[in-house]
Image (cartoon, rainbow, N blue to C red):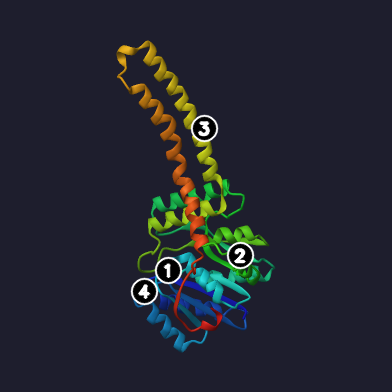
Amino acid sequence: MDLSVIIPIYNEEANIGLLYNRLKGVLDGLPVESYEMVFINDGSRDASLALIKGLAVTDSNVRYIDFSRNFGHQVAVTAGLDACVGNAIVIIDADLQDPPELIGDLYAKHKEGYQVVYAQRRSRQGESFFKKFTAKMFYRILARITSVNIPVDTGDFRLIDRVIVNILKEMPEQQKYLRGQIAWIGFNQIAVEYDRDERNAGETGYTFKKMVRLALDGLTGFSNFPLRFATLAGFFVSGIAFLLIIYALISFFFFTKTTQPGWTSMMISVLFIGGIQLIGIGIIGEYIGRISSNVRNRPLYIVKDTNISSRL
């Protein structure tokens, strides 16, 4: 098969019909002999699954995977990568913020010999200043503290070659950060710029909590800087604590009238011991949590229903 399109779905009943029509119009116009659209229902609570099954009845190019519960966006994309069979694979969200019409440009670059063609945002419509600012800062900080060149202002909307998918299948991390994994793999990569539209309908499934979780997965999965930061912060706090210890001792011996009994010992113990520990414990715990999740080796997702069971 020439091309697979992976679409993770979470409560997108208001967008599925229009998304399908636009995708089909684009894919029918591409110079490909065969293609498939793989919808992954990530525990939707609305009519998304029923709509997808209806499309599968009338269009043999439509495949679907239905999870037993919500496993998260990155896991849903991973399931699509596991099931698809295209020589080229496009990942796109269902909210129509990323225009399906750009797939033609991505595919043209792929035919020029690029294994990864990622869509890079020039602008983002319909999003708050806070979200734009935090996203911009996160991508730039991540680019500076990791040894992997993760492109800034990019999401998961991209085209990847079959060789990339085969390598991704050999990377069994439980906490997926696919854009980082794809950048780590390497090969020939290029950007295609576009202007991101606002969401067509419905509400985003990416809450602030989920965005923070994804950011932590990106930081801990591709950088040891947080651990190094804990060490540096420990030295820094120790330096400040040492100066304050000297101040506390001077106050105790030379300004006894202005100090309270027990103040010196309390300041020394709290600043020296508590300051270092509190900085490092949380960061180290995050890494230990990731190790624990991978050691348990539970299935990344559970499929409840699908029309492509032979591939999973």
Q: Earlier in the sequence, mark 4 or mark 2?
A: 4
The secondary structure type at the circle numbered 2 is strand
Above or below, comparing residue 205 to residue 41 in the picture: above
The label on residue 95 is 1
Q: Earlier in the sequence, mark 4 or mark 1?
A: 4
Q: What residue is disc 4 on? A: 14
Task: Look at the image and tell me in which quarter the N terminus lies.
Answer: bottom right
Q: What residue is disc 3 on? A: 235
Foreground label between 4 and 3: 3
The secondary structure type at the circle numbered 4 is loop
Measured in 3D between alpha carbons, the distance from the residue under mark 1 to the one under mark 2, in whole angstroms, is: 20 Å
Residue type for callout 3: Phe
Q: Nearer the viewer, residue 102 or 113?
A: 113
Q: What residue is disc 2 on? A: 117
Q: Identify the residue shown where x is 40% and y is 65%.
A: 199
Left or right relative to 264: residue 75:
right
Measured in 3D between alpha carbons, the distance from the residue under mark 3 to the one under mark 1, in whole angstroms, is: 47 Å
Q: Identify the residue shown where x is 48% and y is 60%.
A: 293
Residue type for callout 4: Ala
Measured in 3D between alpha carbons, the distance from the residue under mark 4 to the one under mark 1, in whole angstroms, is: 9 Å
Residue type for callout 2: Val
Measured in 3D between alpha carbons, the distance from the residue under mark 4 to the one under mark 2, in whole angstroms, is: 29 Å
Left or right relative to 185: residue 214:
left
Coordinates of residue 202 in the picture (x, y in percent): 35, 68
| Mark 2 surroundings: few (<14), some (14-19) or many (≥20) residues within 10 A | many
